[in-house]
Amino acid sequence: MFVCLCVGVTSHDVDKVVANGACTSKQIAEACGAGGDCGRCRRTLRAIIATHHDSAGCPSKNNCPRKPANGRESKSVSR
């Protein structure tokens, strides 16, 4: 199934990116382009991330033991 029509990315493509460590829709956009154009698919991207985290046994997206796809640690911002 196509997830992002803007760049022609499928759910299989996104699954691979998430399995390789992407934890945010921004990281997915950096890796394969999905979610980086009009943004209409970001809700679907977040659902794929959540499904993967649930099946991987991650306690939460902010406390996932996997390294982010870009190899950098994510920084939290205080508001």
Image: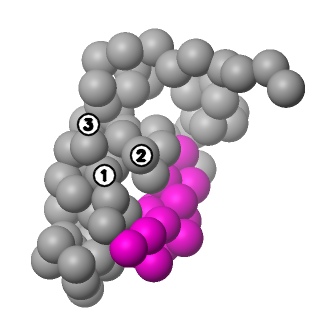
* In this view, 13 is above or below 40: above
Tell me which amino acid carries mark 3. Asn
Q: Nearer the viewer, residue 30 or 63?
A: 30
Q: Which residues are magenta?
A: 38-53
The residue tagged 1 is 29
The residue tagged 3 is 20
Question: Circle 1 sits in a helix, a strand or a loop, which is it?
Answer: helix
Identify which residue is drawn at 26% across, 36% down: 20
Identify which residue is drawn at 18% across, 53% down: 32
Q: Nearer the viewer, residue 78 or 64?
A: 78
* In this view, 49 is above or below 23: below
- Where is the C terminus found, in terms of image quarters? top right
The residue tagged 2 is 26
**Label 1 crowd bin: few (<14), some (14–19), many (20+), radius 10 Å:** some
Tell me which amino acid carries mark 1. Ala
Identify which residue is drawn at 68% across, 36% down: 60
